[in-house]
Amino acid sequence: MRIVLVGPPGAGKGTQATRLAETLHIPHISTGDLFRANISQQTELGKLAKSYMDAGNLVPDEVTIAMAKDRMEQPDAEGGFLLDGFPRNVSQAEALDELLETEDMKLDAVLDLEAPEDEVVKRIAGRRVCRNESAHVFHVTYSPPKKEGVCDVCGGELYQRDDDSEETVRKRLEVYHTQTEPIIDYYKSQGLVATIAATGPVEEVTRRALEALKRDK
Ligand SMILES: [Zn+2]
């Protein structure tokens, strides 16, 4: 199955991508991972991407697309893949279609995770991370530490990352609305979109997504 997962920051896209890819036995291809892998292996594309990032610029679509192409051609992606973070605008979606066409492939579904804006802001802005270990993550409402501001695991100080501030989240949502949301309409015209309510327990959201994929088949 070839799936694209779309959703605003804070909708739990990364978590759902991991869970769905595991259940469906297909690789989870995220742009974040692609960038990290290409940069750490110092591939030509990685070096190119890094030169843009170091200069404080966005990595051009062509570079992202080329990385995604390389990854989709790996043997483990033969039976399908789940794309997370790509495409993130209409021109990338068009490029992906062209790419798939040259390989005689088609997307099977586009899962659109939907969550109310206030909910995603609350989810992200409430995150607190341990200064000692970034894997120690808490949430002021959903998983508060036993003692406010102190990590349950190691006693380290908890803080809010700059990326998680309400102001930054609102900005990221704005970018999502203007850049990424139009791809939903693009894929709707191809009859590929299944809208999934991304609220409630993680397991429940996964179940809804799997149901939608079954219906599509
Ligand atoms: Zn800690």
Image: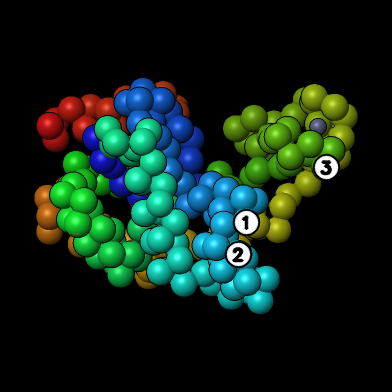
Mark 3 or 1, which is nearer the eye?
Answer: 1
Image quarter for ligand 1: top right
Q: From mark 1 to mark 2, how far is it between C-alphas?
A: 6 Å
Give me the disc on residue 42: 1
Q: Name which residue type carries label 1.
A: Gln
Give me the disc on residue 131: 3
In the structure shown, which secondary structural element does the residue marked by tag 2 occupy?
A: helix
Query: Disc 3 or 1, which lies upstream in sequence?
Result: 1
Q: From mark 2 to mark 3, how far is it between C-alphas?
A: 30 Å
Say which residue label 2 marks.
47
**Contact, mark 1 vs mark 2 (Cβ under 8 Å):** yes
Query: Disc 1 or 2, which lies upstream in sequence?
Result: 1
Q: Name which residue type carries label 2.
A: Lys
- Density class for disc 2 (Cα within 10 Å; few <14, some 14-19, many ≥20) is some
**Contact, mark 2 vs mark 3 (Cβ under 8 Å):** no
Indicate the position of residue 157 as horizontal and vertical percent values: 86, 39
Q: Is residue 168 left or right of residue 9?
A: right
Give me the disc on residue 82: none
Indicate the position of residue 117 as horizontal and vertical percent values: 44, 54
The answer to which of 51 and 10 lies nearer the viewer is 51
In the structure shown, which secondary structural element does the residue marked by tag 3 occupy?
A: loop
Q: Is residue 146 left or right of residue 119?
A: right
Q: Which quadrant would the N terminus be assigned to in this image?
A: top left
Q: From mark 3 to mark 1, how far is it between C-alphas?
A: 29 Å
Query: Disc 2 or 3, which lies upstream in sequence?
Result: 2
Q: Is mark 3 within 8 Å of ligand 1?
A: yes
